[in-house]
Structure formats: structure tokens, C-alpha cells
Amino acid sequence: MDDLSAVGTPVRTMLPILDVRNVTKRFAFGNESIAALSDATLRIEKGEFACLIGPSGCGKSTLLRMVGGFETPSEGALLMWGKPVAGPGPDRGMVFQDYGLFPWLTVAQNVGFGPAARGRPKAEVAATAKRFVDTVGLTRFADAYPHQLSGGMKQRVAIARVLANDAEVVLMDEPFGALDAFTRERLQAELLEIWARTKLTVIFVTHAIEEAIILADRVVVMSPGPGRIVADERIALARPRDPTSPEFNALRRHLSALLGGHHQWRQPRRW
Amino acid sequence: MSTLAGRGISPRQAMLAVAAPVLGLVAWHLSTSGRAFSLIPPPWDVAVQWWDLAFGGVWDDLYSATLLDHTLASLGRVYGGFALAALVALPLGMLIGRIAVVRDLLDPSLQILRPIPVTAWLPLAMIVFGIGPRSAFFLVFLGAFYPILLNTIFGVRSVEGRLFEAAAMLGVNRQAIFWKVVLPASLPSIFTGLRLGLGFAWVVIVVGEMTGVQTGLGAIIMEARQLSRTEIVIAGMVTIGLLGFVSDQLVQMLGRRLLRWSPQHG
């Protein structure tokens, strides 16, 4: 399956947008230190949609959080456009599974939070917020507060907030894991549509094989004990992808075998 | 928590709210009126006394038509002491909550001072601040201080970690985090502290006015006690209860406006 995809072919540049070089992360655990991630190397090109997949404890969220700047590598280097990542920043927007919305702000204010925090003029903030509230289809809820929204709507706000802030890379940590199946499918389709339009780079952590195949250009397979990258598979199926097609099923079997044959969707969601 | 100042109350709620006081009044009336001798005056006598206290024209003695003066004096002390407590406790609570050094320095001492009842401070207050309104003011301040302080500390300490991450990845710098995240996130707790603080200010006003002040609802209650004018004592108690109630309703109304976003308040 070499070049079946017309959309989303990564643009090759001199530097990759993200360069993870031999990164190891250890956490102190009592007197011991445990490697959550061991010697991970990964290059992400601009415009790529990459999924990190693996069971609990494989270090996928740790890797994502290091790219986000919330954790620092114990060893190795993590570069964005060739420069070391130093702390969180607006160039790398994060979408959390538990949303992380500001409950005291309306939908529009949450979406405009980034531009406002960075001192953009009021009129511009309002216009940007409106544009991205519309993008995620929440126009009617612009003045609602987060506690009045469903989980799917909250996650739309979280995505709009990152888009409105001009993030180059969108990091998504099991963003649809807490949503029901219907909402999840709709949001997957909407995310792909936004990605195709904006040419963003997306790194998406999931434990669901099907979700990874539906979304990604590339699936990075990880395994636990210690967490490490075991495979890096290109998904060349044309979009939109049909989960019932034989090609899709072949990929599903292939990835499942790489993951050790476990039925990943039966694993607990959080660790 | 449904309240009168909230989105209207149903007739059923209104009836239930009135039922208990009416029953109490009836029991009070039956157990005190028509007796040759009762230390506790019947409700009607108290109502007449309250009227005289408020408007005069019944007994026309030393107390007639003085209620407004006493009320204003007490209101001044309650809101003054409360405002001063808020002014000190809010910034102090934020510092203790956010800065480890300040917490380590002050928290243990405050934990020891906190259980000491306001009443126990009375003699010292009168030595330090003298007999009169300044001591009263200090005691009211003390009563309102701890609830505001403790709830502020709790509020700024219990901001969800995720919100700091969200703000950081959206580009908020370290200095702005306090105003953009910590303060708004802790507003519900701070508000609860202010509400409790104002409540306590009313609770301690009688003790506060045992410091030898001439006017104030607490002052006439203590004075009437010595004169065995129990109907004045009860009239004063009722007045404090009603004022405290109205003042709490106002605070709650304010809270509902400011905290519309909070599921607990909105």
C-alpha cells in the first residue's frame, strides 16, 4: 500500500517540525526510579497526523506531555524546528481528555483566552473567538458556560481554543476517550475535516486501534515495561476510511499483532 | 439552597418557611401569657415593646424610638469590622495559600490562635483598645477574620492543576497566572468565606458590644438584661436576626450575579 492517499501527504522540509532524539523519561517512585519511556526516537513532519498507540504504561502520554513541555526528558533531546522544547507554549496546543476548560468563562471567552492572554486587541480577540466557535459548530452556545455543555461540546471548545491560538502542533491526549461512541465518531470526522483544511500537525494519543486507523497518516506503536516505540506504520488508505473494508481490517490485524494480540479496546482507559 | 432572594419561591415553600416560626410563636404564647408571673414575656408584649423601641408612642421612656440609632451603630461595627477583616484576610490568605514560605511562617501560629473564642479576647481587647467602640470593632473583626482567611487559603490552594497546564499552553506567563487562573478559580471559595465572615460578624456583635459602648443592639440587650427588661432583650434579638438574614440575602444575590458560571452558585 504505497501511495493510496492523496490528502495529507507530508510536505518534506529540511527540518522536521518535531524531532524526538533518544528520549528517556524516568519518574521517582519511592526510592526507585522507573523508566516511563526508554530511548524513544521519532521525527514528525509538518502537516502530519500521527497517532501514538499502546496499552497502559507504554509511555504514550508521557511522550506527548514532554512534547507539550509539561515534563522534561531525563535523557535525550526534544526539538521543535531544531530548537529544544522549553516548557509549554502556544505553538503546541494541548487538548486534554478532561477538557481543562476555564469554568468561569463562556464558550466564546474560553476560545478567545489564548489571544487575550497574549495581549491581542479586544476586537481581534472577539472576531477570532467567533470564527473558531463557528468552526466547531457551537455558534448557538457562544455565551454558555462549560457546566452547561455536554462532553462532546466541551471537547469542541477545547479544540477551538487551541485553533484560535494559532497552534502549529495540536497535541491530543485521548481526547475522545470519555465520549460516547456516536459523539466520538462525529468528532473524529470533524477533526479530520479541520485538519485537512488547516494543514495542522496533529499528535494524537489513543488506546483504540480503530480510532488510530481512521485518523492517522502514521501510527506509532508503543509497548510497556519500559515504555518504548516498537513500530512506526504508515497508513496509506484514502480518506474517508471505511472501518468495514478488507484493507482496514488487514491493518487492524497487523497493528493488533504488533501490540501483542491484545484487544486494546478492552483495556482500562486511564492509568 | 433556595432562598427568598433567589428565583421566586413557590407558595408551598413560603408556607413551610413560615410554619416553624408560627408554631414557635404559638407555643411561646401558650406557655407565657395569662400567667400571674412569667420571667419570659409573652410575644405580644415583645411586639409592643419592639414598636415602642422603633417608633415610640407606647411607653415613652429612655428606650423609645431609639432602635434606629442602635441599629446604625451595630451596622457600622458589623460592616466596618467585616470590611477590615476582608481587607486583611483576603490578601493574607492568598499569600499563605500560594507562597510556601509565608505558609510555613504563619500557618502554625494561626492554627493555634484560631480556636480561641472571640469572647476570650474581650478582656485583652479592652486593655489594648480601651473601653468603647474600638474594642467592639476589633472583636467583630476577629469574628469575621478566620472564615474569610481559611476559605481564601482553601480556594487558592485547590485550583485544579489542569487549569494551570491549560493556561500555560495557551501562552499565559507566570506573573499573569494569578489574575487569569488562581483568582477566578478560587472565587467560589472566597465568596463562601465572605458570606460566613459576615454571618459571624453578626454573631459576635453582642459580645463585641459588651465592651462598654453606649449604643448598639448588643449594648441595649446587655443593658436591658441588667434592668430585667426582657422584652427589650428579645426585641433586640429579633432585630439582629432579621438584619443578619437580610444582609445574608444581599450577599447571596451578589454571589449569584458574580458566580453565574459556578454550578454551586449560578
Image (spheres, coloured by chain):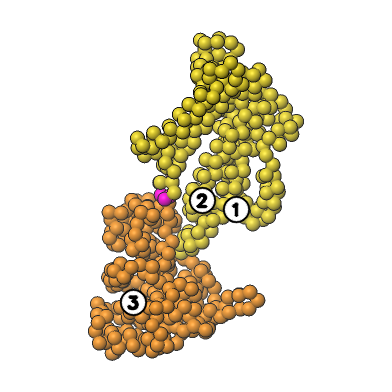
Label placed on residue A62 = none
Residue under pointer 3: A211
- Residue B154 relative to residue A172: left or right: right
Residue B160: horizontal and vertical position, in percent? 50, 59
Q: Residue at x 40, y 76 (%)?
A: A206
For residue A189, side relative to residue B195 (left or right): left
CB within 8 Å, label 2 to label 1: yes
Residue named by callout 2: B186
Q: Is residue B92 above or below residue A20?
A: above
How far, Cα to Cα, is label 2 from label 1?
11 Å
Q: Residue at x 48, y 73 (%)?
A: A271
Query: Do tags 3 and 1 sit on the same chain?
Result: no
Magenta region includes residue B262 = yes
* Chain identifier of the residue bearing label 3 in the image: A
Mark 3: amino acid: Glu
- Report if residue A64 is visible in the image: no
Query: Who's orange, chain-wise?
Result: A
Q: Can you identify the residue that label 1 sits on?
A: B97
Chain under disc 2: B
Identify the mark nearer the N-term, 2 or 1: 1
For the residues labelled 3 and 1, say whether their Cβ atoms are less than 8 Å apart.
Answer: no
Picture quadrant where residue A213 is located: bottom left
For badge 2, the amino acid type reads Ser
